[in-house]
Image (spheres, grey):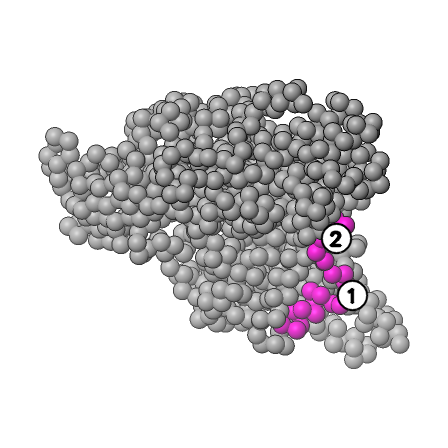
Amino acid sequence: MVTLLVIGIGIALVWALAYHRRAARTWVGSLAVALVAATWVLGASLAVVLAWLLALAGVALCYPSRLRREYVSRPLLQHFRKALPDISASERIALEAGTVWWDGELLSGNPDWRKLRALRMPELTAEERAFLQGPVEELCEMLDEWRITHELHDLPPAAWDYIKRRGFLGMIIPKAYGGLGFSALAHSEVIMKLTSRSSTAAVSVMVPNSLGPAELLLNYGTQEQKDYYLPRLARGEEIPCFALTSPEAGSDAGSIPDFGIVCRGSWRGRDDVLGISLTWEKRYITLGPIATLLGLAFRLYDPDGLLGPRADVGITLALIPTDTPGVEIGRRHLPLDAAFMNGPNWGKNVFIPMDQVIGGVERIGEGWAMLMNCLAAGRSISLPANSCGVAKMCALTTGAYSRVRRQFGVPLGRFEGIEAALARIGGNAYIMEAARRMTALALDLGEKPTVVSAIVKSQLTERVREVVNHAMDVHGGKAICMGPSNYLAQAYQQVPIAITVEGANILTRSMIIFGQGAIRSHPYLLAEIEAGREPDAQRAVRDFDRALFGHVSFFAANAARTLWLGLTGARWARVPGDAHTRRHYAQLTRYSSALAFLADAVLAAVGGSLKRRERLSARLGDILSLLYLGSCVLKRYEDQGSPSEDRPLLEWAMSDTLAQTQQAFVAVFENLRPVWLARTLSAMVFPGWGGASGPPSDRIESDVAQRLQEPGSLRARLVSGVFVSRRAEDAVATLEAAFRAAIEAEPVETRIRRAWGGRKPAGVGEDAIALQARADGIITDAEVQVIARANRLRRAAIMVDDFPHDFGATAVYQTTQAVTFEALATESDKD
């Protein structure tokens, strides 16, 4: 019995040392004391002797030595090299691009929440706020998306002129070059508000401020290129586009067929100029049909050795004025009835001088690395902002519509099925906004988080698809009938565009997030890979030895943490937070440990075949993505002062995120082979009594849904940044007016129902209820006007557009006349 007790104490000691990730010296000292004590208690028994032998072997492995390197690390390195998958040059560049940020903490197995909580969310400057409240509002007021998409098929000339004149195309360009020099957060806020009004305007503005000539020039351009082009781009004198995608090389940009040949030619009156003869064909290029400055990605060849010994120089980026002879632009694609400029361009034997290469001759062949390092802007800012603008508009309008629209005599929002849809709209909008702001924070801190940018791009564009679908369901016929008063259908049509661009979500989820994150963010794996490719034998063994045993310690620690946190449900995890957030921090910590442990186990089991195991990689990527979203939610809640009225949204967001995380783990275990490994890992992560993460409860869903249907600080925070027109005839403005009028009328309508015992008098139509109630002395004349105004605005808000029989180019006819507040007031006075 004593022997078993001593063994149990020994196991507990080893477990505790691993759990807390103690240094080797602490391990040696602790085990020495424990073994001396065990020897004193048990004597020189067989168990004690074995324990001493195991401990000595462990000490020998813990400390680096020539013996360990020669007889342990060197043979393992040889095996590792055989199992190491081929990594192409383009893949290696992608792995090395950008920076590791909070994704590294989540894959560490023990996130340092103090770091996250200590980060101060950026605030907009006075100049940035003024721009949002002034030029952005004015531009939104100028826009009519129905007219843009169905009549003009472009932004109005006045809007284009305003965009150029007020600096919208130069938000990321520093003031020294004539730009606005805005922060990432301000850039994101502008795109989000524009999206809530017009996706055409938002896309037209976000592309020049995303991956393109300005971004590339700022990071890699020569000083001469910056001095010439950046002021012109900032003033809107140049309309830029960037041509990357070819018909047969979309996501596989490393296989670009477009090429350039180093040669000599003529350029604007100069002869015998060293330059490049370019031939290309590109598709899906936003702003391409109207661009004056074309950024081009191509593979450069130097067969005559004019630049050096390399014949295949590699992917290179150049700037081409579109008035250069041989450049063909102007034709358009029609992406899902969207009106933003998008189309093909091509050229054959187009000559440009070498100084048109971005960064000059020194940057030839570096195009892929330049693109990878600059990709964060589109993924981290533009598309998340676009998605949040749509989600917030859906939350604003669907909450209001659910209060205004009635079925069976009661508002839609009182039905439980509608509540479930509203909760998913509001909860997802809350999660998305949290991720948008936190990722903008990373960029403003100088990070280029490649994995995080892939997470927010894929997660937010997928979540906005769900949000729009729920909003369409709740609105019903109002949403499916196109016309000027339909504020949802354009977003519904164009959501797939965001999902497709900047790395299609299928590719991003199944290959990039975990495939890149597991290597890039792992504390040891990249070092092991680099050691495996090191040509110097001695250095390779030394580096591999250091990384390998660090990795072994890391794996053991995460295994111990995973099992303990699973057994206890993370109840005693050391995490920050208050009564409402601490348990969420604990669960995120638990799943972080489990992901780090599982990732190593899976990588050891499948090795290089992970590149082909896309479903497995996608599920592991889902776990990492959901942990990131959960982190964002907690930070948003605390940064806003932990408002009590936001707790339903916090609970919904964290319940949904943690439940999906658990489901992703289960999906990995159900599909992992061999089965014994899957069952072992599942038993470690979910021991059976460690507490399950369930989806949001019906109570939380109802609470969130009702808050979306009430004016107040929660609704205001949730939909902040959405544009609502000052024009009374605008569809969203009319809905908001109807929403507030319905709320004002409800107490009066309740008093009437109670006075009549819940039934209206026989023969009294809906339009005459208020008049009959006044005749019965139940309400006053002023209250009659309150109900009349609510009824008229409700009617205006729920009606849909109709057209002439032939859908001709005649004026649009509505089933009701255009409603203005002034007209309503006049009609109310007449009553």
Q: What element carries label 1?
A: loop
Whole-number angstrom distance, CA of label 1 to CA of label 2: 24 Å
Amino acid residing under circle 1: Trp
Q: What is the count of numbered marks? A: 2
Q: In which quarter of the view is residue 604 placed? A: bottom right
Quadrant, the C terminus: top right
Q: Residues within 10 Å of mark 1 (few under 14, many from 20)?
A: few
- 165 versus 269 height, above or below: above
Residue 305 or residue 468, whichever sits in front: 468
The nearer-to-camera label among 1 and 2 is: 2
First of labels 1, 2 by sequence position: 1
Q: Element type at marker 2?
A: helix
Question: Is 290 on the left or on the right of 127, as rendered?
Answer: left
Is residue 474 in view? yes
The residue at 75%/22% (across/down) is: 781
Q: In which quarter of the image is residue 805?
A: top left
Q: Give the range drawn in magenta.
A: 678-700
Instruction: Decide which of 756, 384 is in the foreground and name it.
Output: 756
In the rendered structure, find residue 698 and report the number of the disc placed on it.
2
Q: Position of residue 19 (x, y in %)?
A: 72, 59
Image location (x, y in percent) of residue 527: 50, 57
Residue drawn at (40%, 61%) of the image: 87
**Residue receiving disc 1:** 689
